Amino acid sequence: MIVETHGHLADAQFDLDRDDVLARARLSGVTPFIEIGEEEPQWAKARALSESHPDVYWTAGMHPYYANAVDGALLDRLAQSIEHPRCVAVGEIGLDYHRDDSPRDVQRKALADLLAAAVRARKPVVLHCRESHPDRTEAQQDLLDILRSVKVPADAQKPAGVAHCFQGTVPMAQSLCALGYMIGVDAPLTYPKAGALREMVATVPLEHLVLETDSPYLPPQSHRGKRNEPAHLPAIARALADIKGVPFDTVTSVTSANARRLFRI
Ligand SMILES: [Zn+2]
Ligand SMILES: [Zn+2]
């Protein structure tokens, strides 16, 4: 069974066939699922999905698009929500210098506050990091600086997590791994123009990779332009197996074990 570590199945695009989408994924060998609550209005939906499907877990976070809305009251409500037994992480949280929906200093402050909340709750984090342009590295640099500056109480562990849909540089991937973070791999791996991404992923040991579809976004090459769904996760595993030169089953078992360790599921 392949663990799907990142999906947005509460999205309205799945309103008509959500249960069928989950059933199709299971038939493709994909289960369990991590449902990402990327902003406060999504938390209840993600939690409800996990309560109606025993193989769905959920996360609560504030995507950097919504960093403007992160204040003390929001952090209190987040702390309460993530106490739910099936809430396995804080996320997604991070930096998005592509959309810049909130000013960058606001994004950095929100990320630091949300990381601190995760440390207090002893939950891993799901990180989102997007540059203004593929050639830039400011968002990755800032992310790394903030991760390094997280204060950890003496009785707590350093926060673990995953840099989801990571498309950064090789040195940055190595730094994230050295800090104990996983790298999340998605279907852009299957895109003809993604040579740099494939080269970066080739340098990361399988023990630091997890698989994700980010549904309904980022469909594999065979489904470009359509809605993505978790049943496409094996296509990502196949692409990764090609890059690593290892059997498909090795990719699925190692990455799924990584995901289970990370999210404690
Ligand atoms: Zn994201
Ligand atoms: Zn996402």
Image (tube, grey):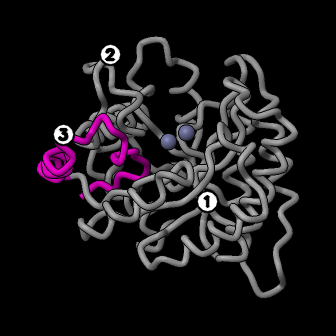
Q: Disc 1, ligand 1: is the CB inside 8 Å? A: no
Alpha carbon distance from label 2 to label 3: 19 Å
Q: Say few, some or many: other residues with alpha carbon within 10 Å of mark 3 (under 14 / 14 to 19 / 20 or more).
A: few
Reading the image, the residue beneath label 1 is 125
**171, 216: nearer the viewer:** 216
Alpha carbon distance from label 1 to label 3: 30 Å
Q: Disc 3, ligand 2: is the CB inside 8 Å? A: no
Alpha carbon distance from label 1 to label 2: 30 Å
SS for dot 2: loop
**186, 257: nearer the viewer:** 186
Q: Is residue 194 magenta?
A: no
**41, 146: nearer the viewer:** 41
Outermost residue, bottom side: 155
Q: Which mark is residue 242?
A: none
Reading the image, the residue beneath label 2 is 225
Residue 249 seen in this snapshot: yes
Say which amino acid is labelled 2. Gly
Q: Say few, some or many: other residues with alpha carbon within 10 Å of mark 1 (under 14 / 14 to 19 / 20 or more).
A: many
Is 189 rendered above or below residue 47?
above
Reading the image, the residue beneath label 3 is 16
Residue 49 position, x and y percent, is 31, 60
Magenta part of the protein: which range? 1-29
Say which amino acid is labelled 3. Leu
**180, 97: nearer the viewer:** 97
Residue 75 position, x and y percent, is 71, 65
